[in-house]
Image (cartoon, helix red, strand yellow):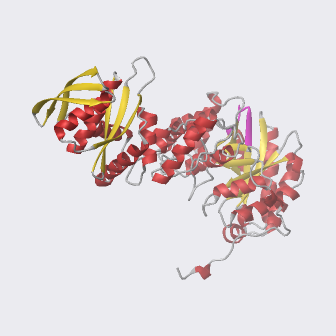
Amino acid sequence: MNNSNKYSKGYFMPPVDCYDWVRKDSVDRAPIWCSVDLRDGNQALVVPMSLEQKLEFFTFLCELGFKEIEVGFPAASQTEYDFLRALIERNLIPDDVTIQVLTQAREHIIAKTFESLVGCKRAVVHLYNSTSLAQREQVFRKDKAQIVEIAKLGARLCKEYAAKTPGNFMFEYSPESFTGTEPEFALEICNAVIDIWEPTPDRKVIINLPVTVEMSAPHVYACQVEYMHKHLNRRDSVIISLHPHNDRGCGVADTELGLIAGGDRVEGTLFGNGERTGNVDIITVALNMYAHGVDPGLHFENMPMIVGMYERVTGMHVDERQPYSGKLVFAAFSGSHQDAIAKGMKWIEEKHPDKWTVPYLPIDPKDVGRLYDKDVIRINSQSGKGGIGYLMEKQFGFNLPQKMRESFGYEVKDVSDRGHKELMPQEIFDYFVEHYVNLSAPLRIFESHYVQKNGIIADVSLELDGKTYECRGNGNGRLDAVNQAIGNVLGQEYTFEEYHEHALTTDSASQAVAYVCIRRDDRRYWGVGIHNDIVTATISALVSAINRMLA
């Protein structure tokens, strides 16, 4: 890329140092949240939502806990006007929810905006005009004084129309393209608007500082916000709102640093939908706070449902790696990751700590409706014994011996590798049953009889490769005696190495599961037996191991 010299920094640092925000390490309280999904988000859709879809989505946003929702630009389109009227006339706005509408600083638009609000109990009227150097020079071709007059005219008109329209109205002003505006000029025009609106601590106004286009690293925006925070008139009567877009991929960082620098409120969308690269993703910002112990005040406990609703109504797709909400954000395919997560989960179960510290999982997936065995431990050719063992134990109840986890893990990885696919839990379980559990060919035992004499004597009837044998073995227990009997038929081709057992379930219908390992030369073979009777399960595990060896 050889044309980088055609670009320059389009932003302006404050005239004085504004770095107090650096001394804070995180956001310590939830801001006021304002969803702009129905305005910014809707205007960015390839196919905008229908009236009924917008009504459904508005109700959905209320259920998620949003108390302020920007519903559109009612003077700009009949569709948005009708949507606002439907909300009011159908009485769909909860008493604790404030709607917000956008307007330019032009009288006929302001008049139409207030007309659309007739009958509304409470609303924010959001006035804006562009203030950046590029907009002033290229679009409006006006000087600073003329741009200030546009804002002041709009502020006066809003005040006049609010006075003659029944309802409770709050004002918001945005110097659009704030990040490309000289901070001193942004302060001048905002203070001019504040002086006209004359807010009080009991009747505040909102000054919105939009990252209309992301033009700098996030720390620059933080300095710009802090400058406004320190110098706005009537600061105790002003709510500083942030409205970041994501052109440089830093929307979340802009928001978090902006809040640390003095912001009180955030305008954004679910999953970051919006023009170009989108608005800031409120879900990510909120759950980042949650991960640091701050309650965001929004209801994101069922993320799969939220994703499904959003995708259905908007026609957009939530990326699999979208923070917190994507299908794969908690998924661990890597063997080392799976092992650490499994051990971390075991530590949590044993220690019951006050705080969540599981490796690789910044929050408990259950808090957003995800499941460990479905959404966290994912099995493919990169997986390891820890993850496969964890899945077999937590989802199916099989606590595989440590050495068996390793050998079974390699088999499962090989199956995934040869199939070039991820294996679902049920596929792994089916493979386990088919290749390890209660195997009866080429060796099958019909019956066994035991006598206690100098240990245990076992008389065994078995079939091997279609031939029937009656054999006897003597050992220090039933398993050992049967093993000796089978060895007499096979010619002692193997040595017995390990045996483990446990109850498969804890209810009255509990079954026993047994694991047996035998070795021939340098290879080990595991078998599994399941039965209501532990002795039968144990013998079946031995036979299964032998059948794996003979295969």
Q: Which residues are magenta?
A: 116-124
Whether residue 478 sits left or right of residue 118 in the image: it is: left
**Nearer to the camera, 375 or 137:** 375
- Write the residue at 40% across / 44% down: 405
Rendered-image quadrant of the C terminus: top left
Whether residue 338 sits left or right of residue 65 in the image: it is: left
Residue 501 percent coordinates (x, y): 40, 31
Whether residue 281 sits left or right of residue 488 in the image: it is: right
Q: Is residue 503 above or below residue 220?
A: above
Which quarter of the picture shows residue 495? Answer: top left
**Nearer to the camera, 452 or 502:** 452
- Write the residue at 46% across / 39% down: 373
- Write the residue at 69% across / 41% down: 296
Residue 393 percent coordinates (x, y): 44, 36
**Nearer to the camera, 445 or 486:** 486
Residue 276 percent coordinates (x, y): 56, 59
Number of marks in picture: 0
Any part of residue 149 in sight: no
